[in-house]
């Protein structure tokens, strides 16, 4: 497999809802073992994950309108659930953006840009402020994952005298 394909795979993985940078950076290390290639692929994965938040945030409104307009009973139930979530968000709003940043920054499954965008949308938080909070969270998560991969490999090398 050519190197260009490997970089594309890492980029797509970083944009996927389940893996994001949490999966893309370790994958980059496996696919591109040289340090320079791994660093470049890691940067590409961060860019891919940063790019997904605005797409998701700005698409959710369209999807919501489509569901409400075309899905009858399900649309009405969905609309009520959204209104309830937004009413409840008043108490969360005090910590919303900092909480959103920390939520996205924790590199665990279902805590990335996709879920952060959905949470921000459901809580009715400002798109612009939410986008900034999510992007900062992605950068923090990327640094944590990158450091974990690099340090983890160094520890393994020392343990096994590689």
Image (tube, rainbow, N blue to C red):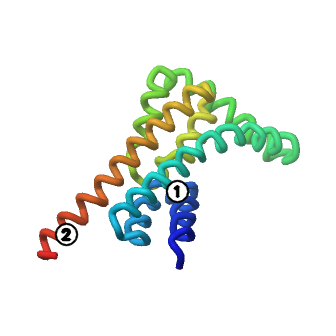
Indicate the quadrant where residue 53 lies: top right
Would residue 14 appear left or right of 58 to someone viewing this image?
left
Secondary structure beneath dot 2 equals helix
Q: Which residue is mark 1?
A: 14
Q: Nearer the viewer, residue 99 or 70?
A: 99
Q: Position of residue 116 (x, y in %)?
A: 53, 41
Q: Secondary structure at mark 1?
A: helix
Q: Marks 1 and 2: CB-CB under 8 Å?
A: no
Name which residue lies at 58% across and 40% down: 117
Residue indicated by mark 2: 156
Residue most toward the front? 36
Cα separation between marks 1 and 2: 25 Å
Q: In the rendering, at what x and y percent does residue 30 appear?
A: 39, 71
Left or right? Give the position of 44 relative to 82: left
Q: Residues within 10 Å of mark 1 (few under 14, many from 20)?
A: many
Residue 158 in percent (x, y) is at 13, 69
| As drawn, 118 above or below 145 | above
* x, y percent for residue 149: 31, 60
């Amino acid at each position: 497999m050519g190197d260009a394909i490997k970089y594309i795979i890492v980029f797509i993985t970083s944009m996927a809802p389940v893996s994001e940078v949490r999966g893309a950076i370790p994958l980059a290390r496996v696919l591109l073992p040289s340090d320079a290639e791994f660093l470049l692929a890691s940067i590409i994965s961060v860019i891919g994950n940063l790019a997904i938040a605005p797409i998701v945030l700005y698409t959710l409104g369209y999807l919501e309108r489509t569901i409400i307009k075309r899905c009858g009973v399900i649309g009405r139930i969905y609309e009520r659930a959204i209104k309830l979530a937004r009413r409840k968000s008043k108490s969360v709003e005090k910590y919303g953006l900092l909480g959103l940043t920390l939520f996205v920054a924790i590199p665990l499954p279902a805590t990335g840009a996709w879920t952060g965008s959905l949470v921000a949308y459901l809580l009715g938080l400002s798109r612009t402020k939410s986008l900034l909070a999510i992007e900062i969270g992605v950068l923090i998560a990327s640094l944590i994952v990158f450091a974990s991969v690099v340090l983890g490999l160094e520890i393994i090398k020392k343990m096994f005298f590689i």
